[in-house]
Image (cartoon, grey):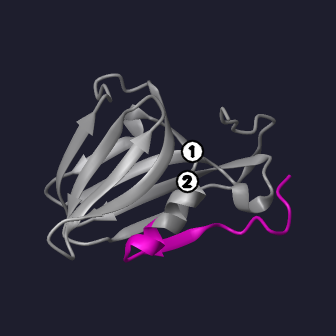
Amino acid sequence: MPGPDSAALRLLAMDEDDLAVISAALQDAVAKVGDIAYEPRERRLTIVFNRYRWESGGGERVRSALQLGGVSLLQARRIRRGARQAVVELLSVHFEVGDAPSGSVVISFAGGGDLRAEVECVDAILADISTPWPTRSEPAHET
């Protein structure tokens, strides 16, 4: 059962430093490839994750949505977009400056896959969209 500190996370990123906070909150989040939605006409990328709640001291996951606005192009590398049930594990989200304020938001996954979203500027929102649930497995990394 979630503790008293289980308030829903809602973060807004408008620059590289803000995006680093979102990246830290999403570390080790998992998603199905089918939960990645790019809407070119709306210039929007949305990914729904099962996020490990590091901020709660662990032991919980929650459904969270990351949304990027102002996306003019999305490129995928080493992600089979037709394999909708395949699971990807997020490693990081970072911004590569182009012709400021535009650039690329790069979403890197374990196994070497990534998404590169060309954006007008950093415009990202991360929001928890479910109540947390307990999990026994804590993400582990090779040292």
Q: Residue at x 57, y 44 (%)?
A: 29
Q: Quadrant of the C terminus?
A: top right
Q: Are marks 1 and 2 in contact (CB under 8 Å)?
A: yes
Looking at the picture, how far across and down is residue 139, in whole percent?
A: 69, 38
Going by the image, does 98 lie left or right of 54? Answer: left
In what element is the residue under mark 1? Answer: loop
Task: Inspect the magenta stretch and tell me whether residue 9 lies in it.
Answer: yes
Q: Position of residue 86 (x, y in %)?
A: 44, 24
Q: Quadrant of residue 93?
A: bottom left
Q: Is residue 114 above or below residue 93?
A: above
Q: Secondary structure at mark 2?
A: helix
Left or right position of 56 against 39: right
Q: Residue at position x 36%, y 33% from top?
A: 113
Residue at label 2? 26
Residue 129 seen in the figure: no
Q: Quadrant of residue 37?
A: top left
| Magenta part of the chain | 1-19
For badge 2, the amino acid type reads: Leu
Report the residue marked by disc 1: 29
**59 left or right of 69 in image:** right
Neighbor class of circle 1 (other Cα within 10 Å; few <14, some 14-19, many 20+) is many
Q: Is residue 13 left or right of residue 62?
A: left
